[in-house]
Amino acid sequence: MSESTQSTTEQHPFTKPGFIISAALVVALIAAVIVIFFVPKSDSTAQPGPASASESASAAATESSDAAGKSVCGLPSSTETALGTAPKAKWELVGKMAAPADPQTFGPGVMDGDGFRSCFANSPTGALYAAANMIALGSSPAQDEFKLADRLLVPGPGRDAAMKEAKTRTSSPGDGQTAQLSGFLLKSYSPAEADVDLAIKLPNGAFAHSVLSLRWVAGDWKVKASDDGQIFNGIAQLSDLSGFILWSGV
């Protein structure tokens, strides 16, 4: 994979520890990448952070109770553990961002009147669809940040922190900016946990990527957040999309 990353030591509102990414998932990513374009480069890759002891225990409990269960809306599960090609998809705009949809097989199996999309299959493709739809929801100014944090994140300190931050924020940074999914890698997968590396094309034409870590909870995929509410496992600029599986709706 060809990529270069920048140090994030410069303290910007979107890169400070404790900044909560909930509804503004993609606009925060955009802002962070734009800021780090101007600081020295170093080689790195975005990787999932190490799980804490409490997370590991929670994951084990989740795997025993939920992994073998059906999705909350009855979508089919799969015994596959890898995804090496781009799935065919119908793409729908969520706000201005294209998101994949296959309601009968991979999800979202439920689309509420307020535009919220949920219920994805317990499969590698289902996890990918979930991740793509989650960032699309997060980029849409039409979605309420507090409700998104509540519904998208794994219950625990991270979700609590995200909901608290969302309640205090009066506006979403960068509303109206358009980013689009351009590719992916399924970094790891089990029926209980998945790490999905998403490549995003930014409004200025540059590319960035980050890993979204998911957990299977109560029949659907949820985002694992750190205790301070952050959901992205590293943000890195990409010089090109080499190494990613190309996948986009626009």
Image (tube, helix red, strand yellow):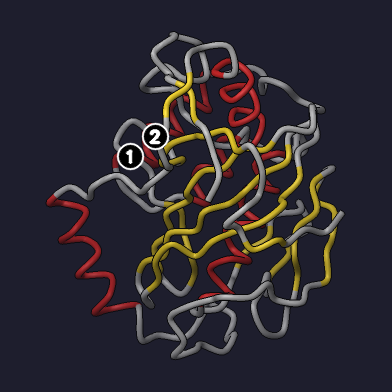
* Depth order, front residue of 167/107: 107
For residue 229, the mark is: 2
Element type at marker 1?
loop
- Crowd around label 1: few <14 · some 14–19 · many ≥20 (10 Å): many
- Looking at the picture, how far across and down is residue 59, in whole percent? 25, 64
78 relative to 19, above or below: below
20 relative to 115, above or below: above
In this orientation, does residue 34 appear? yes
Which residue shows up at 66% across the image and 23% down it?
A: 172
Looking at the image, how many numbered discs can be counted on the residues?
Answer: 2
Q: Are marks 1 and 2 in contact (CB under 8 Å)?
A: yes
Residue extending furthest toward the left: 53
- Crowd around label 2: few <14 · some 14–19 · many ≥20 (10 Å): many
Q: Amino acid at mark 2?
A: Gly
164 relative to 221, above or below: above
Element type at marker 2?
loop
Name the image quarter holding residue 30: top right
Name the image quarter holding residue 101: bottom right
For residue 74, the mark is: none
Disc 1 target residue: 226
56 relative to 163, above or below: below
- Looking at the picture, how far across and down is residue 144, in whole percent? 66, 37
* Depth order, front residue of 8/212: 8
Q: Amino acid at mark 1?
A: Ser
- Looking at the picture, how far across and down is residue 161, in whole percent? 37, 32
Which residue shows up at 67% across the image and 38% down it?
A: 207
Q: Does residue 39 appear to the left or right of 108 in the view shown? A: left
| Real-space Cα separation, disc 1 to disc 2, in angstroms | 5 Å
Which residue shows up at 39% across the image and 66% down it?
A: 188
In this orientation, does residue 217 appear? no
Q: Does residue 69 appear to the left or right of 105 in the view shown? A: left
Which residue shows up at 51% across the image and 75% down it?
A: 124
